[in-house]
Image (tube, rainbow, N blue to C red):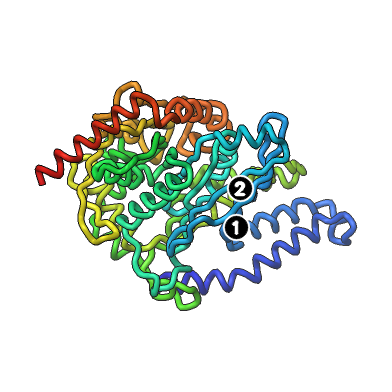
Amino acid sequence: MLYQIYETQRSLMEPFADFAQAAAKMYSNPLSPFGQNPLSQRVSASYDLLYRLGKDYEKPAFDIRTVQVGKVDLAIHERVEIDKPFCELRRFKRFSDDPATLTALKGQPAVLIVAPLSGHYATLLRDTVKTMLRDHKVYITDWKNARTVPLSDGEFHLDDYVNYVQEFIRHLQGIYGNCHVISVCQPTVPVLAAVSLMASRGETTPLSMTMMGGPIDARKSPTAVNNLAMNKSHSWFENNVIFRVPSSFPGAGRRVYPGFLQHTGFVAMNPDKHMKSHYDYFKDLIKGDDTSTEAHRKFYDEYNAVLDMDADYYLETIKVVFQEFALVHGTWDVRGVDGKLERVRPQDITTTAHFTVEGELDDISGSGQTEAAHGLCCNVPKARQKHLEVKGAGHYGIFSGRRWREVVYPAVKDFIAANNNASSPVASRNRRAAAAATKKVSRRK
């Protein structure tokens, strides 16, 4: 019922938001009679702020048209490689007329970026993608809003997330021989599970795995987000945050964790910060500071655009990651596409180098949570493991903004380059060891 009430309220607010937008333009236009008033700039700013607080935020576009590599501008063509019921695998293909540049592009590593399915759209990683495109072939998981997925497409579970990741990895391996994987925030757990399962079966695993700001072990330095998930019962979440999609959407009747509730939670974490940001925006409008106002709009166009998550996936993530800590306890069984249960064993990973990145001031995934992956992947040679703590960076700073571009990306780029040779003696030895370990596991079964 809450979802229906919210949608009704949003529909009622829409004409007022449209009026506020029109009034803001009218009072800011110097050719308009209303724009001649000494207070017109202040009135326009007030209406503009009302519009942005009341408007509906749709899914943003990646809108990456070109990327500069050296002195050459590369044209970017965005396309969907695989279309699954709950996710699209997007590729950002680079084009150039320069022969030398084309030759260089062909030899660059392929990277799968696994975006979080935790409230925001994959476009939150726009800066990540754009930076990576300088030196890599880039693919990203673009998760769909569950309210747009018809009930006829079935359910979506945490196990399905893990299976999607494996399918996407195999897709890139089929094209390039192998690939590298980067997971940001929430997907660090299912990505580690996906690679672990591939290793246990004796499949070829990615050359490297970079995990950034994720809750591998949420017991370490728990944040407010972790405490909520750990201190409330599974039934509390099911009874208080799960609702059915209204009839006005393609996914009518699907049980979801609505995006508007998630957004309320995001804002409630730092209400003073958001209030100050909006007040500063109001003052910048009055001053005519176009640079600051445009930066505010870009941030909140992304931040306020949220999606619904399928209830099964959300509740299982709470249970597995934040309540049972099944990954670190070694008790997590994932159901594959064939219906069989398989135990997640990170210790079976031997050929995939891994790099963990944490922000010093991260208030979503606390210190040590991502680094815990090194203890789980205990059979990866120490020389192929790396950890980076980014000083002064919060959660978003490790994958977007200046610190990402100047501190994190150079380290990620070097790590991928150092582990891009699948035919190296170390990699070959590790593959043989993995095959031998798999045979031993099979015999024990």
x then y, percent, for residue 230: 26, 48
Residue 177 appears in view: yes
Could you tell me the amino acid type at mark 2? Answer: His
Could you tell me the amino acid type at mark 1? Answer: Leu
Where disc 2 sits, the SS reads helix
x then y, percent, for residue 390: 46, 27
Residue 372 appears in view: no
Sequence order check: which comes first, mark 1 or mark 2?
1
Q: Residue furthest left?
A: 444
Q: Which mark is residue 218?
A: none
Q: How busy is the neighbourhood of tag 2: few (under 14 within 10 Å), some, or many (20 plus)?
A: some
Q: Are marks 1 and 2 in contact (CB under 8 Å)?
A: yes
177 relative position to 385: left or right:
right
What is the C-alpha distance between the residues marked 1 and 2? 9 Å
Question: Count of labels shown?
Answer: 2
- Location of the N terminus by quadrant is bottom left
x then y, percent, for residue 219: 26, 38
Q: Which mark is residue 278?
A: 2
x then y, percent, for residue 375: 25, 30
What residue did someone put label 1 on? 53
334 relative position to 87: left or right:
left
Query: Considering depth in this image, is 323 or 228 the residue closer to the camera?
Result: 323
Query: Considering depth in this image, is 364 or 177 the residue closer to the camera?
Result: 177
Query: What residue sits 34% from the left and 29% below the top?
Result: 427
Query: Considering depth in this image, is 201 or 51 the residue closer to the camera?
Result: 201
- Image: 212 above or below 425: below
- Image: 48 above or below 436: below
292 relative position to 6: left or right:
right
Where disc 1 sits, the SS reads helix
